[in-house]
Image (cartoon, coloured by chain):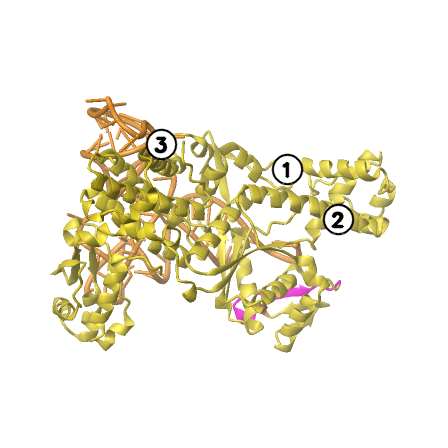
Chain colours: A yellow, B orange
Amino acid sequence: MSSHFSPKAHLTTLFTQALAQFPQALAIAVELERPKQLSHGDFACNAAMQLAKALKRNPREVAQSILASLPASEWVEKTEIAGPGFINVFLKPSAWQRVAADILRAPEAFGRGDPKQGEKIQVEFVSANPTGPLHVGHGRGAAFGASLANVLAHAGHEVYREYYVNDAGRQMDILALSTWLRYLTLCDEFVPFPANAYQGGYVGAMADSIFALHGDRYKRAAADITAGAPDAAADPEGHLDALIASAKRLLGADYAYIHGHALEEQLGDGRNDLTEFGVTFDKWFSERTLHESGLIDKAVERLRQHGHLYEQDGALWFRSTAFGDEKDRVVRRDNGIYTYFAADIAYHLNKFERGFQRVIDVWGADHHGYIPRVKGALAAAGVDPERLTVALVQFAVLYRNGQKASMSTRAGEYVTLRDLRAEVGNDAARFFYVLRKSDQHLDFDLDLAKSQSNDNPVYYIQYAHARICSVLNAWGGAESDLPEADGRRLEHPQERALLQRLSEFPEIVANAARDLAPHLLAYYLRDLAADLHGLYVACQFLVDDDELKRARLSLIAATRQVLHTGLGLLGVSAPAKM
RNA sequence: GCCCCCGUAGCUCAGUGGAUAGAGCAUCCCCCUCCUAAGGGGAGGGUCACACGUUCGAUUCGUGUCGGGGGCGCCA
């Protein structure tokens, strides 16, 4: 952890030393928790109770032994043995009073984990098919992934953010076809538009721009396109595939233009959308490059050499059942085309070849059945599947006036991320999205998110930050002097509560990183804001006593820093005025 | 059929192998001659779904039951 003083870290060191006398203690972790009751001190240690059984001794007796060898500390007021064997530690006020000034001496670094203990981690998230605008489900993956990546980075890891672009699959062909069919109507060639093609207005917009740029260069006869295609009503997917085949045949090299145009338009649109949302990536990894560079062939060959492939019914199968999957999976269809899964195997093997110690995939929860086969493929290729963690993100359901806002992708009537951002703003959207554990269903209350009231947690936290800015502004002194303020003047219970809360921040960041749970940070910030507001009402900051004033200002300046850092990790702004 | 998530205050949800389980909203009562009242204080409100097990200790871990939500079944 960082070089900042932490009462808890200090005590952990002391207890670790005291426990060294017991070989059995190696098996247990030193746990120090903040007791709920004030009368139980600042921290309680349960090591004696954990050790009692292995030592075959009474826990309170073990506690005696631990206390006897607990090194003396200038920050400890007293200790006691309580209840079934808790060791309660009471700290001197000075242990907390130094926290604020300590933060201010290296404000940016507070809460930062030790890079030496960090890992090189890739976080892949969003990765939506570029076949249309991002919707609110993608938005949650984006907000979660971005916040998670920020938290991991702050916790000391080297983080690489990546978006996997599905630019080679059937969905892209359907988009290209959809665009082309819309375009043809502009050329007075009318092919009935399939119900299972992309219906959204953006498709027509792309057709318009192609027509404006190139006139009827891509015009082909409608009759040739539908010739021989299965009936749309009886076999909708077969019908669609036949039209795609016609498009490729009739357009020849021109098909690549339509396809590429649609891809670039949609990918660019998504990139702009995400950038405005504060979500950026180190790399946009193209699926197509996997095919073109032969990485898929290589990956499949690697599985074959390990003896995990077999042929059946003309298709090439991966024996994923040998790795816990419920059935074997096709990697190459009988038509010779690799499945999406084959590309995914190659992609994941490539991730580890690039040197990431750990890979985190953020997926929509509907893909959860996919985990065993991907992990199985890694195991089959000799990569420890534990190095891949899949964080599932459940869908977010929007509520407006207590009513569900529906979304259905192809019908084109879904709520886009852009709509959501326009309605509630980026800050509220980023914050609300990470207010739940990722794998839990999220009911997104639009009315609450956009309400500028105390019901809205985003404003509540931002308001705490703005209030502090306002006080420091009213003071007008040199903030660079505040680290030198005398913390001993911070004696009010509300001041102590805030100091304690501030000292927890590094641990919150570490836990959020460990559990892949940025929501812990969101809740912490709300608690921190509550402590600040409580102090604000209880104490005047700009008092006549100059020493007291500086001490209090150092405290709120440190609070401002943590609010600023924390909100930043969640991608939420920290306004100076509201 | 299989899989995932959830069940905690009237509502929406945090939380933890520990001592008397929390927050916000809603309800009721209070607090601005003062740095932003977008704030604060107080009251009421609970069999942590149920059962069994593991444990010195379970709301937390395991199994089962019941209830609610979602997903999957060579599609990407």
Asked whether, in this view, residue B67 is left or right of residue A263, the answer is left
Q: Earlier in the sequence, mark 2 or mark 1?
A: 2
Residue A294, compared with residue A129, is above or below; it is: below
For discs 2 and 1, the disc positioned in front in the rendered view: 2
Packing grade of label 3 (10 A; few <14, some 14-19, many >=20) is few
Q: Which segment did they paint magenta? A: A320-335
Q: Would you name the residue on which mark 3 appears?
A: A454
Q: Would you name the residue on which mark 1 appears?
A: A412
Asked whether, in this view, residue A525 is left or right of residue A489, the answer is right
Q: Nearer the viewer, residue B33 or A348?
A: B33
Q: Earlier in the sequence, mark 3 or mark 2?
A: 2
What is the CA distance from the residue labelled 3 to the residue labelled 1?
35 Å
Q: Does the rendering let one see residue A80?
A: yes
Q: Secondary structure at mark 1?
A: loop
The residue at 51%/52% (across/down) is: A365
Q: Earlier in the sequence, mark 3 or mark 1?
A: 1
Subunit of label 2: A
Packing grade of label 2 (10 A; few <14, some 14-19, many >=20) is many
Q: Would you name the residue on which mark 2 appears?
A: A259
Q: Secondary structure at mark 2?
A: helix
Residue B59, given in percent of the width and then of the height, sits at 28, 53
